[in-house]
Amino acid sequence: MSNHIFGPVLSRRLGRSLGIDLLLEKTCSYNCVYCECGATTNLTIRRNEFFPTGDVIAELDDVLKKEPPLDYITFAGSGEPTLSLSIGPVLAYVKDRYPQYRVAVLTNGSLLSVPEVRNDLLAADLVIPTLTTTSQDTFVRIHRPSLSLSVSEILSGMIAFRELFSREIWLEVFLVPPHNTTDQEIHSLNDAIYAIRPDRIQINNLDRPGTESWVRPAPPSLVDSISHFFSTGGIPVDTVVLVPSQSSTRYSSDLLGAVFETLKRRPCTIEDIASMTGFHQNEVRKKLVILEKQGIIASRHGERGIFYYIPTG
Ligand code: SF4
């Protein structure tokens, strides 16, 4: 079983995406109330190698030599990928050795104020940073960040990265009503977005159970009105939905391994696991029932149905 490579998973934004996780679980500069990976256990802004870069590259070679059909190779996983010092070298290696694949980085954007981090991401095809607010108070309430982080410095970092990076930036705006959905918040966010000048704006909403149970998705009417307001400036706005993959090839013959690899990183429904792995929903259901009876996994209700997860502790 691979330690650093997971999937391919069917991503809501990126289609069939092979994930690279460079972090110790769960290492992040934020502890967001909406995080689907659970509470942050290592809250830090200190960059580290975490694992030998050569080990990650060896695992990647093992998977990519089979030439899996992919829409993206994505740096993501159980925390903030730019905290890893391996991200620059691994990204450069993938683009050099496997130029047929597009590479995306999902980042909370908190370290884009650091010049070395901006440089590390230059070889990517797509960078998706998150911005939820311009207010430090709201920022702290939603992200519960490492103490020294300031939202105005993060904004400046995003603007500086845009100056440097000519490929695609999709700016994710995650809605956490009512904290960042007031008129004042949305107007101020709109000003910030147009200062950053991303290629697209992606409005994201709670899809799986968040870390805090009080977090609820924004209702569709609110998403629509915010989306309409952001789009009046001319930047295309997407609301994040599941995108169909270019391929439905089953990636692994090991259902148990695929279930663990997927649930290790995020809670999923039966339908999620079936579409990520290519196994039939009935096969997945049977396996989950057995694992839950054995106490190896647990389940809880979310907006889209029953989500399965691996309990911690
Ligand atoms: S949502 Fe992303 S940025 Fe927030 S705590 Fe989770 S991994 Fe970190």
Image: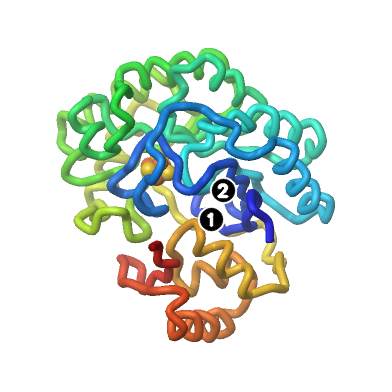
How many badges with numbers are in the image?
A: 2
Label 1: element kind: loop
Residue sitting at x 76%, y 56%? 68
Quadrant (top left, top right, bottom left, bottom right) of the N terminus:
bottom right
Residue 226 vs 66, above or below: the answer is above
Residue 87 or residue 195, whichever sits in front:
87
- Answer whether residue 171 is visible to the viewer in this image: no
Residue 4 or residue 7, whichever sits in front:
4
Label 1: few (<14), some (14–19) or many (≥20) C-alpha neighbours in 10 Å:
few
Q: How is the image coloured?
A: rainbow
Label 2: element kind: loop
Residue 128 vs 1, above or below: the answer is above
Residue sitting at x 74%, y 49%? 59
Give the labeled residue for mark 2.
14
State how far apart marks 1 and 2 are (Cα). Answer: 7 Å
Residue 311 or residue 300, whichever sits in front:
311
Residue 296 vs 181, above or below: the answer is below
Residue 44 or residue 170, whichever sits in front:
44
Q: Is label 1 in contact with label 2 (beta carbons under 8 Å)?
A: yes
Quadrant (top left, top right, bottom left, bottom right) of the C terminus:
bottom left
Residue type beneath disc 1? Val
